[in-house]
Image (cartoon, grey):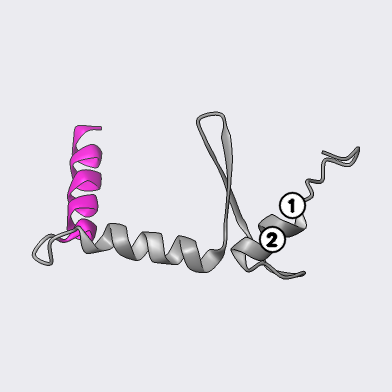
Amino acid sequence: MGQQGRLVIPAEMRAALGLAPGDKLHLHLTDARLILERPRDAVSELRRLGASVPDRRSLVEELLAERREAVAAE
């Protein structure tokens, strides 16, 4: 890491990931790890996770029901 806190991704890793100058990356922490992802990879992962939710299940309705219960409990 440089003095200004910048990280340099080695050229061979950028090539393997298909990264080009100016590409955007998503950064997030998982435990003690810093994860770098291309946005399209993050979108693919979200789609994969969403595919496991049954069509008959409404996550929005579940969230609204939880919020209503919380308000009623106040």
Which picture quadrant has residue 35?
Answer: top right
Tag shown at residue 48: none
Q: Secondary structure at mark 1?
A: loop
Q: Is residue 53 left or right of residue 39?
A: left
Residue identified by numbered label 1:
9
Secondary structure mostly seen in the magenta stretch: helix
Q: Give the spatial CA distance, label 2 vs label 1.
A: 6 Å
Question: For this rendering, which residue is in front, 4 or 41?
Answer: 41
Give the mark, 2 or 1, whose residue is nearer the N terminus. 1
Classify 10 Å Cα crowding around label 1: few (below 14), some (14-19), many (20 and above): few
Q: Is 69 part of what is drawn in magenta?
A: yes
Tag shown at residue 14: 2
Number of labelled discs?
2
User: Which residue: 21% across, 44% down?
Assistant: 66
Question: Which corner quadrant holds the C terminus?
Answer: top left
Kind of residue indicated by mark 1: Ile
Q: Is 64 part of what is drawn in magenta?
A: yes
Q: Position of residue 40 (x, y in %)?
A: 50, 69
User: Which residue: 8% across, 65% down?
Assistant: 56
Marks 2 & 1, CB-CB < 8 Å contact: yes
Which picture quadrant has residue 69?
Answer: top left
Q: Secondary structure at mark 2?
A: helix
Q: Position of residue 60 (x, y in %)?
A: 23, 59
User: Which residue: 79% across, 50% down?
Assistant: 8
Instruction: Read off the magenta span.
Output: 58-74
Question: For this rendering, which residue is in front, 49 or 18?
Answer: 18
Q: Position of residue 33 (x, y in %)?
A: 57, 35
Q: Position of residue 54 (x, y in %)?
A: 12, 61
Question: For this rendering, which residue is in front, 13 or 51?
Answer: 13
